[in-house]
Image (tube, coloured by chain):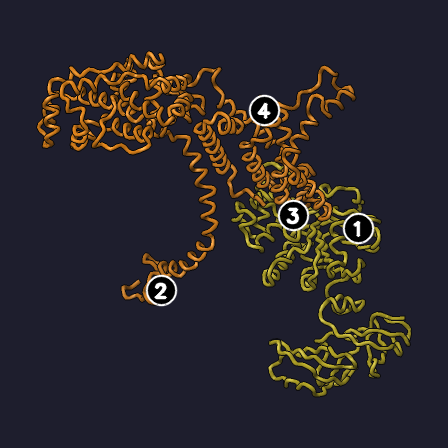
Chain colours: A yellow, B orange
Amino acid sequence: MNATAQTSTEVRGAAVRFDHVQKSYDGITLVVKDLNLDIAPGEFVTMLGPSGSGKTTCLMMLAGFEPATHGEIFLNDKPINNVPPRKRGIGMVFQNYALFPHMSVAENLAFPLEIRKLGKSERDAKVKRALDMVELGAFGNRRPAQLSGGQQQRVAVARALVFDPDLVLMDEPLGALDKQLREQMQYEIKHIHESLGVSVVYVTHDQTEALTMSDRVAVFQDGVIQQLSSPDALYESPQNSFVAQFIGENNKLSGKVTARNGNLCSLTLDDGTQVEAEAVNIGEPGTRSTISLRPERIELQPSESRDNVVDGVVKEVLYLGDHLRIVMSVAGNDEFIVKVPNGGRNTVPVEGEVYKLGWSAIDAKALDPVT
Amino acid sequence: MSASTTASSNSSISGSADPLTKDGQPLKRSLARALRREKLRALFLIAPLLIFILISFVLPIGDMLFRSVENKIVEDTLPGTVRALASWDADSGELPDEAVFAALADDMMLAQEVKIHTRLGSRLNYDQPGISSVFRKSGRKIKALDNETAQAGFIAIDPAWDTPDAWTALRSMAAWPGKFAATAQSWKNWEAWYLSEEKEALDPTTTVPHGFTYAALYHDLASMPASDITALANSKNTTAVALFKQLAGKIDTIGNDDFKAQFADIDKGWADIDNWQAIQRLSPRIVDSYFLAAIDAERTSEGIEQKPDNERLYLKLFVRTIFMSLIITGSCILLGYPVAYLLANLSVRASNMVLILVLLPFWTSLLVRTSAWKVLLQQQGVINDLLVWAGVINEAGRLVMINNMTGTIIAMTHILLPFMILPLFSVMKTISPTYMRAAKSMGASDSLAFWRVYFPNTVPGIGAGSILVFILSIGYYITPELVGGTTGVFISNRIAYHISSSLNWGLAAALGSILLILVLALYWTYDRIVGIDNVKLG
């Protein structure tokens, strides 16, 4: 839980629990396979995954638009499988905002309040507060079509929050915005979450979004949560190579485990090179494993002695301003990437030359046991 | 801005002066020139279509609508009478004077010769029932009219009046088309009559006109003050001078056949002031009589009045047409909306299937579909049989569902339903299902979400469908004709009757014009209330 939420307002967010939830549309394949997920009150949880991974289905089950095929979803410890969407009291931001085109911005915001039969003055006050929160106080009389994409997005957020729900669901809300606006909105949504203390379940396929905003990220693949942890843990210690690959950039080296000593292990790569790696998830010595290695943790021509030093042939050098991106051939991997920060005095590697590469054993994660 | 501002900087600043191009030309003119070629090219490309539409569509419809006010026939058939009648005071309570009857005799002589008097009779009969028989009868007996008294009177004063020279001299006078207008008209009639009778153009050097022309001359002279005749006697034409010197002071001795009495003998209709009022009323080439008839009004001596209740027909039909069209539009909305909703929310495969079912009626003949309704709805038909069999109604209580309003409404709703479904469908397809989800996530019940969120977004489709269905149904003809009986017919059926049976095209055109104006007015109202931009036709 983050500290700001607790200090600024009392936590009013709802707790959500998925208990062995399964979902199938056609009775043949499971889109969601045995989902177990606990979301604490006031937490910002992101469901991250490629399209078709089941993350949006989970969100729709939580919102009540799709029934769970098996298992139970709890909201504040009450089962909600048989509660219709309108009685769940969950705010929702849709992918294309779903602002009602025939109503003005203020009418859109007043809609959930009218349904809750709030008086006119109370309604107006809440609408004004919600619009001020997203800095659109002057736009109440506009039609959604008269607003820019970013403004529509903010109205959608305001509408999802205006009736003070304990839980807000967001279904790829920033997908239609350009890059700069998307980054700005990420911060705004994060700040709104922090100041209101509601629980947020956020669905996206954009890993940057997931890392910037979330308290915890659930990485989905094939209807299964591959890993559920905080953004830094997700990046620093991925539990399998799918997560490592999906979050940030990643080099793969495959080989055979030769020995295990504590939390480290030794491997023999396919070309015979010996390397040390952190034993995150490996089998018995003799089984195969994949090492995952971040490109920015590799040092070109290491000055001091490193746990691992191997030779690599430079294949291509790309100049990207703040860093150099070098594609190399290392231990049988022809797409081995090394990022060298641009310190201003680097010597640019020459294509076709052999260079030494070094990295620490704990930066190399041995994953994916194959038995 | 200083006075020395260059053209280029001027063009970039939105000042008071028009922006200029680099070489100092006004930017607007430059742009127009650059676009002109394109425009001409585009015009050239669409020219064949434009001309085709103009010739095959705009012109015939324009001509047809113009018939609603056009009324050449009276003046073309009775030119002299119309001219003479212009000065008659219709409210005087007296018949027109002898000069008018003389002109009528003259005009009728020619009209019966070229056989157009019965056509005029039919035309006048639309506004003055009974007058056509007056014309028919007069045409038969016109040749028997005594007409030579005036001729004999002229010759008695001066035998020269029996020579073609006298007429040549008369016709060459400056006063001929003015002071002798009636005579000049009569001469024209005589020429036309001669051509028709003798099959050759008359030779004015060898012939003198018939008695009617002498009668016209007599009336022209009789209506002139004596000083005018003295003045004519002083003109430059020697033959004419001689003739008019002889005439001076002796006009009264010429005498005249009493055409008024003779016409009254032929048919007492000529002694009826109403008939003469009708002729005078319908003399102009542009008249409003068809439009008045189309709204059940007539022009009487007291001005425009509504016809008595038992003669009113068209207003009632217009009201019925609009009323039934509204009911049909309403039923189409009620029946079409759920179907369109289904179409928009089914899977593509299933919705294509349903769409085919919707369009299927288009592929069968209208007559077949309408006749099928007859089979279903008639008193010995399927529905009545089923109801009787089920015991809902008894034998005596069989429902009358065809050849009345009900039949027309049922059959036309069925026929026009696709025109409502298709625009509705195209609008509903564009409404994202997330709107409904969003409404529900905010706490709205299904029905509230529908009425507050879904329905308002389908209004453009309802508008488009309603305009289509209403305009189609207001002018519909064939279905009401087949299943409408007497109580379920539309104004179009009356138009068709006047086009093909009564041949009163003017009235048909007037009814059609009113229908057109009505539709345009409704369209305008719709635009003001709903806004035509809110209509999506697909």
Res B256 → quadrant: top left
For the residues labelled 2 and 4, the Cα–Cα distance comes to 68 Å
**Badge 1 amino acid:** Tyr
Question: Which is closer to the viewer, label 2 or label 4?
Answer: 4
Q: Is residue B275 above or below residue A5?
A: above
- Viewer-proximal residue among B479 and B388: B479
- The chain that hosts pointer 3 is B
| Residue type, label 3 | Ser
Considering depth in this image, is A132 or B267 the residue closer to the camera? Answer: B267
**Residue bearing the label numbered 3:** B432
The numbered disc on residue B446 is none
Q: Residue pushed farthest left?
A: B234
| Residue at the image point whose x is 71% and y is 71% from the top | A249
Specify the quadrant that holds the N terminus of chain A. bottom right
Kindly identify the amino acid type of the residue bearing the numbered disc 2. Thr
Return the x and y of residue B472 as percentages of the image width and height.
Answer: 56, 35
Q: Earlier in the sequence, mark 3 or mark 4?
A: 3
Within 10 Å of the Cα at label 4, are there few (<14), some (14-19), or many (20+) other Cα atoms? many
What subunit carries mark 1? Answer: A
Rendered view: A270 above or below B87? below
Res. A113 in view = no
User: Which residue lies at the image location 80% right of the left edge and 74% below the top edge?
Assistant: A291
Q: Which residue is mark 4?
A: B488
